[in-house]
Amino acid sequence: MTGRWSRRRRSIDVPPSWSAFVVLAVCLAAVVGAAVFVVVRQPDTPDSLTGGGARSEVLSTPTKVDDQRQVELVPEMRDGAAARVLRSGTLTSLDCKPGDTVRNGSFPVAVDGVRLLALSTDVPLWRDLDTGTTGADVTAVQQTLKSLGTNVKVTGRFDEQTRRGLRTLYGKAGRTWEGSTLRRDAVVWLPPNPAAVASCEAELGQQLSAGDPILKLRSTVLAFAFKAVPKDLVAGPRILAIGDVRVPIIGYQPISGPREVAALGATEAFRAWLDAEGKIPLPASLVLAEPILALPVPAAAVAVSATGAACLQRTQGGPLAITVVGSSMGRSLVTWDGISAEPVTVLIPEADFICG
């Protein structure tokens, strides 16, 4: 009796074979696989996105959109110019420090003790200006004098009112201008919107010849052009934005207005572009100056006519002609003439529905 029970106990205590483990693992994998399949095949998607049935209704409220688009800018640069003296003599004074800006209408340099006037003009002064002299260089001098706060009218003729403007400019600096001629060698020409000083090119006591450089300016940005303009932009005035800086644009021509260029040129993104010597992109955004109202709807709610015109079906009224202003992840943003902030109920049309 004892031996029989002993043999039975030994048979019960035998560990399960590897084949049993394999069968159990396969069964568990099948159960887990079925569960995963159910989760993937049955996502919890709202009816407003799937469209529900063929005639589902969707209630939606218009929202404001600015149609933001990413663009890349291409700066148009001017190489750094050199400021030169046009008379020979000993350099007796020079206000020059890298990083500083030579102020238009200042007197930063002296040769043989005579202070020279720094003028930033569109046209370099290429001759002495006497009474009655006319030309583009005269116009440029008058424009600069006017921008510096003198009461000068731009006539294109070097006349008494221009001379009064020069005397006023000299007087503001505590200096005196005498005579009736603006001598070319009394002026140090600077390009329009001069940049900061890159380097000083002369030393005190140095003997200068006419045409010698006294300082060199940094490269200057003249304009910002669009590398490419996005297609299908929503119509309306737009603003270009880099960080917190926003400037209006006219069309999509290069931005060259002095104020706009100065504002964009002061951004961290542009400074990074300069530091990288133009080897990295200069990103910006195009947005509508005034956001518009647009209605978010499932993409399935938008019907299209044979000619490509889009429309919505409403619960009240006939088909509504619309313009699609954006789409993402199964949702479309649409607008139309006379859109208001009131909620709108639209229908998901049948598959064969075509706008009339």
Image (cartoon, grey):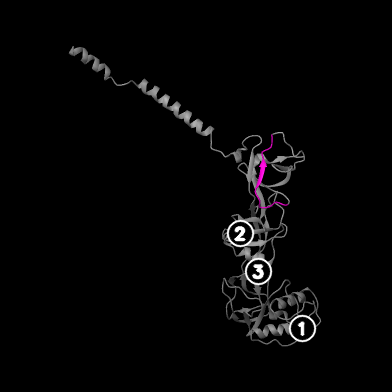
The residue beneath circle 2 is 242
x and y, in percent, of residue 341 in the image: 66, 52
* Quarter the N terminus occupies: top left
129 lies left or right of 89: right
Check residue 69 for magenta coloring.
no
Identify the amino acid type marked 1: Gln
Identify the amino acid type marked 3: Ala
The residue beneath circle 1 is 161
Foreground tag (3 vs 1): 1
40 lies left or right of 52: left
Q: Main secondary structure of the magenta part?
A: loop
* Residue 96 appears in the rendering: yes
The residue beneath circle 3 is 81
Tell me: residue 225, above or below residue 352.
below
x and y, in percent, of residue 339 in the image: 70, 51
How far apart marks 3 and 2 lie (CA) works out to 28 Å
Can you tell which quarter of the image residue 251 is in?
A: bottom right
Q: Residue at x 47, y 30 (%)?
A: 35
Residue range corresponding to the magenta coloring:
338-350
Foreground tag (2 vs 1): 2
How far apart marks 2 and 1 lie (CA) works out to 43 Å
How far apart marks 3 and 1 lie (CA) works out to 31 Å
Q: Are marks 3 and 1 in contact (CB under 8 Å)?
A: no
Can you tell which quarter of the image residue 353 is in?
A: top right
Foreground tag (3 vs 2): 2
x and y, in percent, of residue 317 in the image: 73, 43
